[in-house]
Image (tube, rainbow, N blue to C red):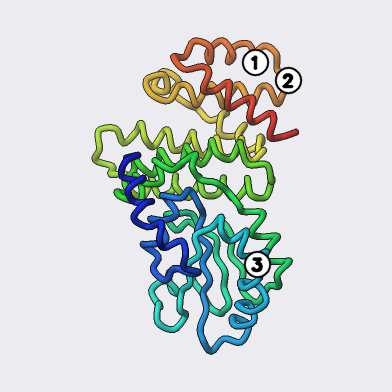
Amino acid sequence: MKKLLLLLFLSTSNLFATNWYTDLETAQKVAIASNKLIIVDFWADWCGPCKKMDRDVWGEEEVKTVLADYVPLRVDFDTQRQLVNQYGVRGIPYVVIMDANGKVLHNNLGYTDKNQTLRVLEKYRLNTSFMQLETAYFNRQPSYSTALRLAQKYLDFSLYVEDPGVRKTVLSLAKEYLSETEDLLDSKQSNYNMVEQKIELLEANVDLYDGNYRKLARFLEKKIDEEDLRKYNWGIYCFLNYCKFKEEDDEENIQKWEDELNQLKNPEVYWTRYSKLVASKE
């Protein structure tokens, strides 16, 4: 896979000299290879505010410098109707920031000046190398398993995002990929119950990282078959309980779930997540 991504990057490197891509599929491949988000400008040649943004915003050197950390895609409002409809575009200029699979992090309808645009570009200036392989696998073959792995990656990635607003957006993408996992899951699969169980646990994990401890508590108070969880998803369940009781300062249960975590094959994974979670609150 690494060789494939390298070849893809080399084959498309000459395209970086152009200002805007006009094909979503190409932009997605470049985004995966270069670890960048895609910025999409829905426009038309008859649109006055679009031309004003070209002149006063996109053409400014300061904007171009930040824009280099994105894959720029321009979509014609009149001729590329499938994408216009897919993203519910009702007016232009309409600017969208999305990941390499087309999941939206930010959108804005209407003209924005240079300073407003720069604030948004700086805010979402993310390097997506953390989930490059998972993104590439899902892009090449969407399935419940590739969606689930990518959801977990976005969850972990959220712990490294400093801006609280962007962190919340990244968590919303994790939920979208969990929803995608459920859509792609076949109820006739032999592992259906296990995957459904993991989706529920990771959705509760989203609530944890989002600081929604009340919702997390309601989930953990439900009647759950712990013996069944021990087969496949015990680690996530232990982690959620530990974090909940740490928040409540319940020493007895903290010790119980700390012991359970330390008995796992990979306790360091969860302790790293916990330390990042604590750091993200500071």
Classify residue 57 as left or right of residue 25: right
Residue at the image position 47 percent from the left and 64 percent from the top: 17
Q: Are marks 2 and 3 in contact (CB under 8 Å)?
A: no
Circle 1 sits on which residue? 254
**Image coordinates for residue 57, horizontal then vertical, percent:** 65, 72
Say which amino acid is labelled 2.
Asp
Disc 2, SS: loop
Say which amino acid is labelled 3.
Glu
Q: CA distance from mark 2 to mark 3?
A: 52 Å
Residue in the foreground of this view, choosing between 131 and 267: 131
Residue 132, placed above or below residue 80: above
Classify residue 171 as left or right of residue 231: right
Looking at the image, tell me whether mark 1 or mark 3 is earlier in sequence order. Answer: 3
**Image coordinates for residue 96, horizontal then vertical, percent:** 55, 65
Say which amino acid is labelled 1.
Ile
Residue in the foreground of this view, choosing between 43 and 156: 43
Per the rendering, the mark at residue 249 is: 2
Per the rendering, the mark at residue 61 is: 3
**Image coordinates for residue 148, horizontal then vertical, percent:** 40, 40
